[in-house]
Image: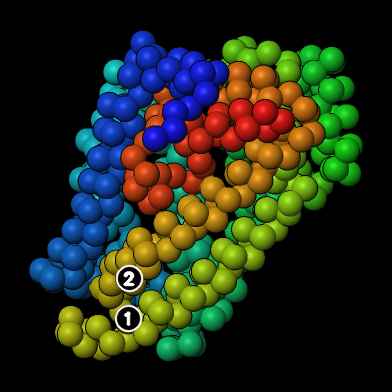
Amino acid sequence: MSFPRKRESIHLFMLIEQSRSPKPYNRQKLILSLTSAVLSAAFLIVLLATGLSSAARDVAIRVSPNPYGALLIYAAVIGLTETLLFLPLSFYRGYILEHRYELSNQTLGRWAIESGKGMLVGIALFTPLLVVFYGLLRQFGDGWWLPVGAVIFGLSVLLAQIAPVLLLPIFYKLTPLDDPALDASLRRLAERVGLRIEGLYQIDMSKNTKKANAALAGIGKTRRILLGDTLLAQCSQEEIEVVFAHELGHHQYHHIRTLILTGAVTTFAGLYLTSVGYRALLPRLGLDRLDDPAALPLLALLLMVFGLVTTPLQNALSRHYERQADGYALQTTGNRTAFIGAMTRLAETNLADPEPHPLIEALFYSHPSIGKRIRMAEGIGG
């Protein structure tokens, strides 16, 4: 049996012995996420099995004989019902749990406002997409999956481009980084990989949370670096530099481009398999038209099952990319002390579990555990 080296044990001991134990928090988050997924699937099954979906469709048609008008009325009725049913769970997960573990800065009013904004943005994005999808379903019949996949792919690229300039400012205030030394240092790191960025911005995460984060967002002319004000307040310049270098690693290895392409393949495959299952199961539900709004919960359920199967594979690919980005950050900065310090500080701030169960990590983690990232850094040059 081998034992970790002393310095590794010290870092992991610091994480595990946090004053707020991370394991209960992460266990509750996982249970709530799984509960939400199970209840969402159950909601769809109930709609289909009890005839409630058909009843809602009939009401919508009586209100509006126009197929698109009926579709929107049906979607509004089902969406409102689901929102009200899941509101207690959303409130517990987003407000009560975060306050219980001292991670949230939100007042009840602020939580309601942010949740409301999220809902309105979701409606604004989902409504035209639903109308386009329905039109393609009516026009292309069994071949609907191909044009729908093309639309989703194009929309995902568009959203990646406009998110930092149009969507993110709805929720957060972005201001140019007011630290000339840090700004110059980060720009020098970006120049090493030939990355041109529109700007370095501070994002006011602290209005909602004590958690810290950073991101490389946007595509082309909208590409920018986002640093949470919580990150700037809690980490040293060297630690911020190594976090930034990690984000540059994603650019260096073309991870964003690869993820977009693999996401496109997954989307087309998922839609195709869903179309096959959709056509096969419709008669068993007493439905005979592909474009019957009452059958839409079946589509959602089939896509949910496909996501359940593919998510662990996507997470495995994501963890591989994160390890590559970590390695790049260490090689670029040559500062494993700062890397370990940043990982330790972020784990403490975000209440991350440094040593999750291997099965939990394999199924649900998009990043390697903090413990593994620290051990990897300890091995560099050691």
For label 1, the crowd category at 10 Å Cα-Cα, with few meaning under 14, some 14 to 19 and many 20 or more, is: many
Circle 2 residue: 302
Work out how far the residue at label 1 is from the one at label 2, CA to CA, in angstroms: 8 Å
Numbered disc 1: secondary structure: helix
Q: In the depicted view, which residue is nearer to us: 36 or 51?
A: 36
Q: Quadrant of residue 242?
A: top right
Residue 209 in percent (x, y) is at: 47, 21
In this image, 346 relative to 66: left or right?
right
Whether 48 is drawn above or below 195: the answer is below
Do callouts 1 and 2 mark residues in contact (Cβ within 8 Å)?
A: yes
Q: Position of residue 295 (x, y in %)?
A: 28, 75
Taking the image as shown, residue 120 lies to the left or right of residue 203, namely left
Instruction: Indicate left or right for 273 with 86 as reference.
Output: right
The residue tagged 1 is 278
191 over 289 or under it: above or below:
above
Q: Amino acid at mark 1?
A: Tyr
Q: Residue at x 67, y 20 (%)?
A: 338
Q: Nearer the viewer, residue 310 or 83?
A: 310
Instruction: Look at the numbered disc 2 and give the secondary structure of its residue.
Output: helix
Q: Is residue 294 left or right of residue 5?
A: left
